[in-house]
Image (tube, rainbow, N blue to C red):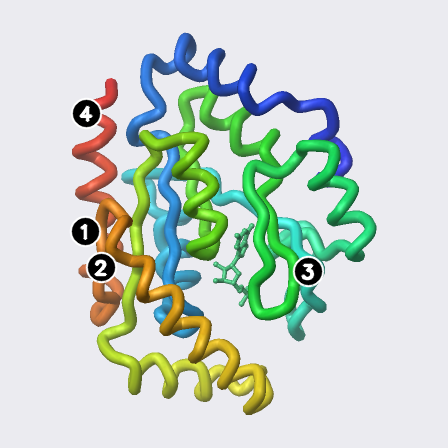
């Protein structure tokens, strides 16, 4: 999909029609944050393949350079700064933030289309972006994923082997700042055992859907 296709979408109109289409947004949108190295991407991948929830996982736009093996339109839409700013200023991003020196944002149209069709949506975004979504859609479910401890976090960041020492240090500092925001999330989960984390999230989600239906 070309991110330019999100043009002309009006968030407020979509929210109003969402309410008439589904009754409530509760249980339709799950926002997942957590520092790099907590394993949140793996958790999200597992949820994406889980038939109990079958969510649509939003593909973000970013100005970051692709890592080896990443493909435009799969992990991210990799955009130039100009392309990203165009999307943002034209109102086509549900939220956006600068993370680790790059811009990231959620294209609104695919997310709102899914919600309007009664689908479940996951956003994997940083705490700044999550705070913007909470302003606009307070009924979304906010989940913060922790590593078992900071040493595990650091080991996971180093183990990835894709980032330089300065990038790792930047990410660790960023992790501390993100953890300081965890208190306002609806759920905080320590991702020690992947299966357990996924099952907990599915259970929360199932509860919310039954309440919101
Ligand atoms: P990475 O570059 O390692 O894939 O992601 C870096 C950080 O950016 C992660 O914390 C990730 O959750 C966050 N991120 C990814 N997409 C978005 C987005 O669309 N909006 C915001 N605010 N953060 C994002």
Spatial CA distance of label 3 from label 4 is: 36 Å
Q: Quadrant of residue 44?
A: bottom left
Quadrant location, the N terminus: top right
- Tell me the SS state at disc 2: strand
Residue identified by numbered label 2 = 189
Seen at 38% across and 64% down, the residue is 178
- Tell me the SS state at disc 3: loop
- Tell me the SS state at disc 4: helix
Spatial CA distance of label 1 from label 4 is: 16 Å
Spatial CA distance of label 3 from label 2 is: 29 Å
Seen at 26% across and 65% down, the residue is 194
The numbered mark, 1 or 4, whose residue comes first in the sequence reads 1
The numbered mark, 1 or 2, whose residue comes first in the sequence reads 2
Which percent across, then down, holds residue 72?
A: 71, 55
Which percent across, then down, holds residue 97?
A: 57, 53
Quadrant location, the C terminus: top left
Seen at 34% across and 34% down, the residue is 140
Residue identified by numbered label 1 = 200
Q: Quadrant of residue 210?
A: top left
Ligand 1 within 8 Å of the CB at mark 3: no
């Amino acid at each position: 999909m070309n991110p330019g296709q999100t043009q002309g979408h009006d968030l407020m109109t979509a929210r109003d029609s969402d309410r008439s289409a589904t009754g409530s947004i509760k249980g339709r949108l799950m926002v997942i944050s957590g520092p790099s190295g907590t394993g949140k991407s793996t958790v999200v991948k597992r949820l994406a393949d889980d038939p109990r929830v079958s969510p649509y996982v939003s593909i973000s736009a970013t100005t970051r350079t692709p890592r080896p093996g990443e493909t435009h339109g799969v992990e991210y839409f990799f955009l130039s700064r100009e392309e990203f700013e165009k999307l943002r200023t034209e109102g086509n991003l549900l939220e956006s933030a600068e993370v680790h020196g790059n811009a990231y944002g959620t294209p609104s149209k695919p997310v709102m289309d899914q919600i309007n069709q009664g689908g479940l949506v996951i956003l994997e975004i940083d705490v700044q972006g999550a705070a913007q979504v909470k302003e606009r859609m307070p009924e979304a479910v906010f989940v913060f994923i922790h590593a078992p401890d900071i040493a595990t976090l650091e080991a996971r960041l180093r183990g990835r082997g894709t980032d330089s020492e300065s990038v790792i240090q930047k990410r660790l500092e960023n992790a501390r700042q993100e953890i300081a925001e965890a208190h306002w999330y609806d759920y905080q989960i320590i991702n020690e055992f992947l299966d357990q984390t996924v099952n907990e999230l599915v259970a929360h989600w199932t509860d919310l859907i039954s309440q919101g239906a």
